[in-house]
Image: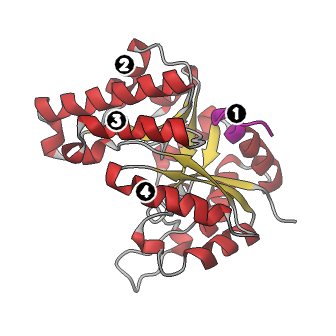
Amino acid sequence: MTLKLFDTHTHFDVPDFDPDREQLAYTAKAVGVDHLVLIGFLQNRFQDLLRTHHFINDLENAPQSHLAPGLHPFYIEQHQAEHLYDLERLLKTEPCIAIGEIGLDTFLKQHKQAEIFQKQKDFFAAQLELAQQFDKPVLLHIRKSHAEVLQILKQQQFKQGGIAHAFGGGIEEAKAFIKLGFKLGITGQITNLNAKKLHQVVQYVGPEHLVLETDCPDMTPLCCQSSTEQRTRNTPANLPYVLQGLAKSLHMHKEELAEQLWQNTHQALHLTI
């Protein structure tokens, strides 16, 4: 029996997949990936995002694609005010499921500079306003900035919820995001037994607050990495390995967990089952 899975975070539109996207879509569907979300990060990628979305949905025996355009905090230097208008136009003209990935990122030293970090906050707040206006959940990118992201969500009284993508915080942060109506996105990182903090978080919050994602082409599950390459490309077809790693961490049967995650995802993305 093939389980029904939902990949809540992919960059399946990027050039890494240009040579074999169609074949990979069929492979993903064959292993149970029924749906996937295409995530935005730069305004100049919006057209490719849209093109890939329509391409996948025109295929038979491929996952159903959903759009989540947004302006990613890591690329803050490239974002301009008018890009927010382009995002708004996309929300008006296309059936977008969410806005993403948006948030804050202070991983790089330059992004900690007051002026640049303020620009990240401004773009995050503006995109949360769009999410409120269009009643869309958001897909959060949070790196070394959990407290600041939570603060802005509370300031804006954000009620649409969504997913804290590739969750990397601790138990207290996990509780805070769940309280605000968010699910936690679990990647191939869960297949790493040394990711002790992540295992503690998922075991503490339990299966009802989690969703699956590949974050392809990144975050390749350990079992799918090959030592011959510098970086092994991740694909939506690897999602069952994420499920497997999570089931192992939670001491659950895959079938039971998959059913719970399917419900969680529909809830997080405001979809009817």
Indicate the amino acid at tag 2: Gln
Q: CA distance from mark 2 to mark 3?
A: 22 Å
Q: Nearer the viewer, mark 1 or mark 4?
A: 4
Residue range in magenta is 264-273
As displayed, is residue 11 above or below residue 260?
A: below
Q: Position of residue 40 (x, y in %)?
A: 43, 49
Q: CA distance from mark 4 to mark 2?
A: 32 Å
Image coloring type: secondary structure
Q: Position of residue 16 (x, y in %)?
A: 42, 73
Number of numbered discs visible in the structure rendering: 4
Q: Which residue in the structure is indicated by mark 3? A: 84
Residue shown at the point (48%, 81%) measured from the top left:
19
Identify the disc placed on residue 151. Answer: 2
Earlier-in-chain disc, 1 versus 4: 4
Q: Is residue 191 visible?
A: no
Residue 181 shown left or right of residue 13 in the figure: right
Q: Which residue in the structure is indicated by mark 1? A: 267
Q: Position of residue 237 (x, y in %)?
A: 63, 69
Earlier-in-chain disc, 1 versus 2: 2
Front-most of residues 133 and 93: 93
Earlier-in-chain disc, 3 versus 1: 3
As displayed, is residue 30 above or below residue 205?
A: below
Indicate the amino acid at tag 3: Leu
Do tag 1 and tag 2 residues touch (Cβ < 8 Å)? Answer: no
